[in-house]
Image (spheres, grey):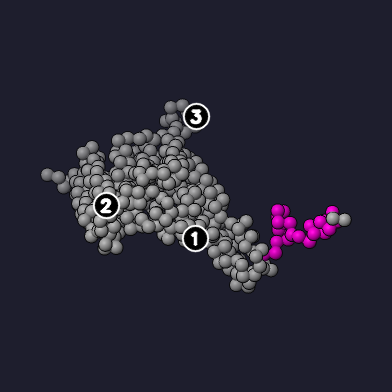
Amino acid sequence: MRTETMATMHGGAGALTPDLAGSEPRDWLILLKPRVVLLVAYTGVVGLVIAPEPMHPVLGAIALLAIALGAGASGALNMWYDRDIDAVMRRTAGRPVPAGRIAPADAAAFGLALAVFSVVLIGLAANWLAAAILAFSIFFYVVVYTMGLKRRTAQNIVIGGAAGAFPPVIGWAAATGSVDLAPLVLFLIVFLWTPPHFWSLALFAHADYARAGVPMLPVVAGARATRRHIVLYTVLLVLSSLAPVGFGFAGLLYSVAAVVLGAIFLRHAWAVLHDAQDETGRSLSGDGPARAAFRFSITYLFALFGALALDHALGGMAWLMP
Amino acid sequence: MAHAVSERQNQAMPQVGEHDPQAVEIVAHLTRGQSEDLARKRRMRNRALGLVLVGLVALFFALSVSRLADVGDPQKWSRPGAIAPSR
């Protein structure tokens, strides 16, 4: 930023564009991808809440803050590395780095510092197992997904989705100091949720991805194949969402929520598959079903994990059972 | 002769590589509106940084106090006198 700003300033009066006049605190917040952070922190809370060992509330809150900061650090490092493709995508061109409000080097330093801080913080507040998993999840998102997979394979978000699935495991590990079957099932649910969520987005934003050269499934395999994959992964997701009931760590409330939410998600996926389309699979309806599926996928994860936490708080609603 | 001319040119040219805060002429090149906008953004950043620093103090205070409260009765530790057992 400093170099670019100086260079522009030497151009004389009027050469300084508003975007290069410096960043606002809001820009640094945007760098953390706050909406993603919210979802990550939320799944982390559920992992922590359903753990069998209670955690000191202040230490639990600090552990969650660390998970959120770790996710934010990953987002900042992602925006630093992807600044070139962000600049050519309409959806991301206004981000602080491609828009020139934050210098790439500053974004990288901010992300790295925040990553180290978040790992040390959760280590001090909870334990070093949780810290190690958080560190690995940041590494996985930044190095494996962002630098390795995203620009190379259409399976980028299938494998990379693992990075976003770690928070419930971290929350559980923070409370118990160990990793059990329950957090791994939650990991699986988030892992299988990621493809239909991102492929729905990629269906209506495929032109952006194609322009940036990102090999998302609709760009590489076409819209028709993507629609089939969305249905396949939604079926797998709905089946995996019933696993907590099968393994006995969720009760009636969660069961009802999983079935109802799963049925709605399947209906959305079916609508995406049967959307009015041309011979290549391109939507003739402005990708209305894909947009609706994308929106609902967020509601789905919030509601499903919320039901699990509530179910746990109410003791599985065993008092309702005959 | 050529060397003397080159030296005079060097004196007249701004040294871009060296950063001397006293020699920065940014303000002279900015319009009044741009200058005010820059100052406003700098003030906002400073305030945000101040809040972050205060937050860090509160965070580590809360962390220390909670950690001490969470270790339980030292008499019940497996090795009295040792550091608090980790989870």
Q: Which residue is mark 1?
A: A26
**Which image quadrant for residue A22?**
bottom right
- Give the left or right position of residue A98, taking residue A10 as reference: left
- Chain letter of the residue beneath label 3 in the structure image: B
The amino acid at mark 1 is Arg
- The segment highlighted magenta reads B3-26
Image point 29% across, 63% down: which residue? Answer: A286
For the question of whether residue A124 can be seen, the reply is: yes
Mark 1 Cα shell of 10 Å, populated few (<14), some (14-19), many (≥20)? few
The image position of residue A309, as x and y in percent, is 29, 47
For the question of whether residue A138 can be seen, the reply is: no
Where B73 falls versus A270 (above or below)?
A: above
The quarter of the image holding the C terminus of chain A is top left
- Chain letter of the residue beneath label 1 in the structure image: A
The amino acid at mark 3 is Ala
Mark 3 Cα shell of 10 Å, populated few (<14), some (14-19), many (≥20)? few
Q: Secondary structure at mark 3?
A: loop
Q: Which residue is mark 3?
A: B82
Q: Which residue is mark 2?
A: A224
Residues at discs 1 and 3 in contact (Cβ within 8 Å): no
The quarter of the image holding the N terminus of chain A is bottom right
The residue most toward the front is A279
Same chain? Circles 2 and 3: no
Where A267 falls versus B29 (above or below)?
A: above
- Give the left or right position of residue A257, taking residue A10 as reference: left
